[in-house]
Each structure stands twice: as structure tokens, then as C-alpha cells.
Image (spheres, rainbow, N blue to C red):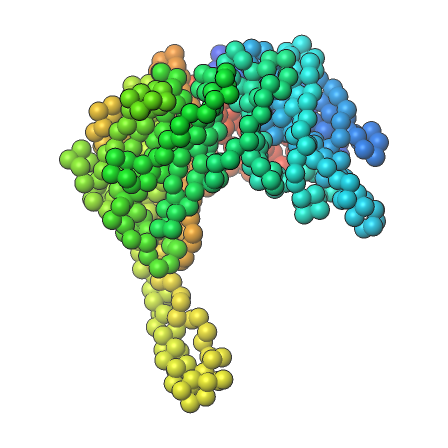
Amino acid sequence: MKKLNLIILLGCLCATAFSQTKIFREVGQDISTSVKPIMENDVLVGYLAFTQLEKLDKDSFSYRITIMDENLNDIGVVNFHEQKLRLEDVMIEDNILCLAYVKSNVLGYTYEHRATRKKAFRSGKAWMLTQFINLKGEIIKTAQLSLDVNIAGNWNPDFIPGSVLKEPVRVQNISGKGFVCFYGDDSRKNMVFYDMNGENTWEKKVSEAGDIVQFMTSDHDVYLITKKEESAGKNQYTVHSYNADDKSTYPKYILKDKKGNNLLALGFENDPVSGKPDISGLIYNPKFRKPMNKDEGLKIRRGMYGGVFNIQLNGHKKGEIKEQFTYWYDESKSNVTAKGYFESGDGYITPNKSFRDFYGNTYYTGSVINSKVRGSSIAWNVIGWGLIGARLALFASNPLVGAAVAPGLALSKYRSFPAGSALVMKMDSIGKLKYENTLPVKGRIQRGSYSYYLGAYCFTVVSPVDRRTYLIMADEKAYVIYSMEQKKVIRTIKRDDNGKSVTVLPAKEGSIIVSTVNAKEKYTMMSVESI
């Protein structure tokens, strides 16, 4: 069995107005831990450490939950026994925690003999288990629902794999009402509503076609965004919404502009001022024609995207939805060609993230890519086409010999798409688009034919007190913290600190967590730091 380690709290090393630091050191074997943020209405309010301790018997384990505040101070500990668990998500509402797990009586268990394991598979089960805990550390309610999953196909002797579900368990709080959980197993996609006492008040099967790409709540409404691939190589996104009070379903909202063009949703979150859902992203170019191959870089270079959009869902009626669409060919564009080439960024922007600030502006980010010809690949193509000619000649004289010569060499690709720095655009409240800045962050370099492009990792942190928004982007070397209001990089954090691995994560409002892993001395230091 794989040996896992427990990270335990050793204590607070320092506590100032600007940071709170703790060390978590590895001790013991066959014991594991995971740390999750505790969220309420999209705001981080604390952290939860879930630890699997020793195995009590052949069926059950001992578990410990450590509840921490936003500064990593311990405020409660819960101990309990249960079968194998995988913690999926955590949320809080009115001082009640809702923890959602996947539970199994077979996944994550070791069997000495194959026959014993096959017998266990036949009786194997999995459940979605929800726990409701108050801040005194008391479990006030536990509930579970059966899951339809492939036990044998997902079995692992050490843990419950994430692949066991088609859609992972996600939890959102509903203000003053309770929680809603969403999951997808092999036979259905389902939403389950719980009140503040942990009682299952109602369930709803989600019958909408497509993958669930976004799940969120706003006030007493629940929102899902589905993605369905279309034949033209573009995706259609649709917003589905439900009322948690009367269980009603609102009319669906298909993400298209007024000309019928599909929209690519990059951001979906509650507006920091109004608290209403806000969707933003890129507009697919209706004149774009998909190339024969699947090279995403070539699609972008040929004008796959034609502009940007922002949609404010202030209600569910047509007159309550505010839409803004800005196209590359509009007069409001800045430094961009009709095909989306940014002169300031010296390339084409790739889809990454979009978000809204406190002043009604919408920002769009993404790594810039260029299309370049690779000399070595051209040489291989020349050779390949020469061999194809020889192959055709051989085929004319001897089909059996000709068919065996140079298969597929002529398909060698000759383009590369190097990733440049990250680009930031801003659309103001009246729809005027402008280039904002270029950040020293590079996405991954992709060469040849590929089906998708991975830009730079990024997230945002807000500070409601001074109404500021910060963009944190990362490449292989460092994290860059950029102030949207100051329009400059205010901090850079290297990912390697003298051999120690550094990760930056979201924290409380106006702060980040800097996690430093020292693999040699087997400890992790976590520090909550003000931006």
C-alpha cells in the first residue's frame, strides 16, 4: 500500500497585522490529510483540515476534522469513525458547516486475494455523504444518498479516485436557507437541497444536455451553465436557473449575441457591487471556418474569436438582463485587427479568464500566442512528400511494396505556437474596449497539432474595503500579482525558494496564502499575507 503522511499543526510561528504563519510537519505512515477552504457567499472565511487517522478494523477508519479561521487559528476539532471517505467540498452558512464526501465500502480498501476482491465488487457501493457541523465541533446531522458508479472500473487500494463520478460533488450555500449539493454519477446529474438542520428538503434531477461547467448560487437562485459541442467546432453555452424557495425552474438563457453568434463563457460569478450573477468571455467569429486539422493555435490565428461580451443577470425576465457586445471591428476596439491580432501584445490572445471589478469594468486575460514556421518540420515535410512520391511510384509497380513505404510522414506539422506574455484587456461600463497591459507571465509552449491550449494559471483576489481587485498569474518560474487599479505589477513571488516549492493560493479578502513545501525536511509552511 502506498505510504501517505499526515501533516499536523505544530503551532503559530508569527502573528502580525500582515501575516499569520503555521508549520505543518509530516509524521506517521498510512495517514493522510487534505485542506479545503471554507467559503460563504464566494468569500473565504476559514480553512478545514480533513485527516484520515488509523484504521480501526477491516471496515472503518478514524477521522479528524480541524476547523481554522481565516488566519489559520484553530477554532474546533471533530473526531469520528466512518468507512472510506473522500472529501469533496466544504461550505458554511450561518455558522453551520456542510461537508460533502464520497463514501464507499470497497474503493480504497486492500484485498489479499483476487477472488476476495471480485466478491467485494459485487456488493460494492458508493454514497454521497453530507455532514452538518456547528462551530462547537458537534455533528448535528449526517445524511447519505446512493451513487450509481462503476466500482470495479474505479477501484484503487489506497483511496477513492476522483474519476468515480462524472461530475464531482460541489456545494453552495443559500443565504438564510441552507445548502445545495450538485453531483453527477453514471445515470444522472442531481441537485439536493438541505435546510440549516441538515434535512433533505427536495431533490431535482438535472436533465439538461451537455457538461456542467459552472455551478453557483445568488441569493435564493441556483445557476448551472452547460456546454454542448456543435458541429462547427464551437461550443454552445446555456444558463439554467432554479428557485430554491418554490422549486421552480426559470426559462433557460442561451449564450448568444444579438446576431446569433455563440459565446465562450470565461467568467461566471456574482458582481462585487450588485451581488447579481455576471457572465463574461469571448464572442465566436461567425465568419470563421474551421481548418481541417484540430490545431487550436491555427484556429485562433485565423480569427476564431471576434470580440468580447459581458452579461448581467439582474433578473430572469428579458428586460432585466443587461448585455454588452464589443467586436474587434468596432470603433471601440483598440490596437486589434479584425482577426484578433493585438499589435501591443504582438500576437493573438488565448481564452483564459474574465472578471468584473468594483467600478463596472470587465477584464479579459490570456496568454498571447504567435504562429511561427519551424525549419526542421519543413525539412521533414519535404522529405515526407518526396517519400510519398516514391511511394506512389512503387504502388503503381508493386502495390504491396508501395503500401509499406513512408506511411504518414507527409503529415508532419510545420507550425509552432510559442506563448508570449499575458495580455490584459478592459471593457468599461459603456462597452468601450481597450488594451490595458502586458504581464511578464508566459503560458505553455505548444508545438504541432493539439486539441486545446493551456494559458497561464490565474485567479483574482478582491479587497472590498478599498475597492481593489488583484490578478494573480503564474508560469513555470513565478507568480505575478497585478493591481487592476494601479495598472502595474506590485509583487513577484518565485516558485522555487532555494530548493523549496512555493505555491500561491487565494485567501481572505485582500490576502493570499503562500505555501512553501520543504521536501527534504518534510514540512509545509503556510502563511496568510496581505497583498
The quarter of the image holding the C terminus is: top left
Could you say which is closer to the camera, residue 485 or residue 147? 147
The quarter of the image holding the N terminus is: top right
- Residue 328 in view: yes
Name the residue rendered at 30%, 47% in the picture. Answer: 304
Could you tell me residue 38's position as x and y percent?
Answer: 56, 20
Name the residue rendered at 28%, 22% in the picture. Answer: 319
Name the residue rendered at 22%, 40% in the picture. Answer: 328
Location of residue 350 with respect to 27 vertically, above or below? below
Location of residue 323 with respect to 18 vertically, above or below? below
Q: Is residue 250 left or right of residue 126?
A: left
Residue 46 in which image quadrant? top right
Residue 133 in which image quadrant? top right
Could you say which is closer to the camera, residue 398 or residue 263? 263
Residue 436 in which image quadrant? top left
Q: Residue furthest left?
A: 331
Could you tell me residue 289's position as x and y percent?
Answer: 29, 53
Could you tell me residue 82's position as x and y percent?
Answer: 76, 27
Name the residue rendered at 53%, 19% in the picture. Answer: 173
Could you tell me residue 153's position as x and y percent?
Answer: 67, 47
- Residue 9 in view: no
Location of residue 395 with respect to 521 vertically, above or below? below
Q: Residue furthest bottom?
A: 397
Could you say which is closer to the camera, residue 9 or residue 46? 46
Q: Is residue 321 left or right of residue 215?
A: left
Number of disc labels: 0
